[in-house]
């Protein structure tokens, strides 16, 4: 499986989370998809892929924070074998045709494997 597939499958193993390999227009809380941020090639042996894993949160901001506090520890534990997580950022994401969504960006990296 590739990095994107590993991340989506690991996210889907968490109850209430539906992982996708690519960006989707779903607005339901618990929708997760990885976005490839960049690949760094530090040496001749390969690269390091940096990912932003998007977790869609509830529309109500207070509920979004409660959901994030409950969900992120379990989701992080599921992603840990597949991604070195460096930060989680609570943001609002503008999606064409969908609108603005409260999301959590789970930032991390792993060896580049885009096969």
Image (tube, rainbow, N blue to C red):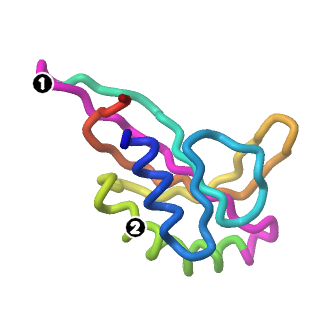
Q: Residue at x 24, y 28 (%)?
A: 47
Packing grade of label 2 (10 A; few <14, some 14-19, many >=20) is some
Q: Position of residue 17 (x, y in %)?
A: 60, 67
| Residue carrying label 1 | 45
Q: Position of residue 41 (x, y in %)?
A: 24, 23
Q: Is residue 54 magenta?
A: yes
* Count of numbered marks: 2
Q: Nearer the viewer, residue 39 or 10?
A: 10
- Dot 2 falls on a residue whose secondary structure is helix
Q: Is residue 79 magenta?
A: no
**Which segment is the magenta one?**
43-63
Q: Residue at x 80, y 65 (%)?
A: 59
Q: Quarter of the image containing the C terminus?
A: top left
Q: Nearer the viewer, residue 109 or 21?
A: 21
| Residue carrying label 2 | 78
Q: Is residue 20 above or below residue 62?
A: above
Q: Residue at x 65, y 65 (%)?
A: 30
> Which mark sits nearer the N-terminus, 2 or 1?
1
- Alpha carbons under labels 2 and 1: distance apart: 28 Å
């Amino acid at each position: 499986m590739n990095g994107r597939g590993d991340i989506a499958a690991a996210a889907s193993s968490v109850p209430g989370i539906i992982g996708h390999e690519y960006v989707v227009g779903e607005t339901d809380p618990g929708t997760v998809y990885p976005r490839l941020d960049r690949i760094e090639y530090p040496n001749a042996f390969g690269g390091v892929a940096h990912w932003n894993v998007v977790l869609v949160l509830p529309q109500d901001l207070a509920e979004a924070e409660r959901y994030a506090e409950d969900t992120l520890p379990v989701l992080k534990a599921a992603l840990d074998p597949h991604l070195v997580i460096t930060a989680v950022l609570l943001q609002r994401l503008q999606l064409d045709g969908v609108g603005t969504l409260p999301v959590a960006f789970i930032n991390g990296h792993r060896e580049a494997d885009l096969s």
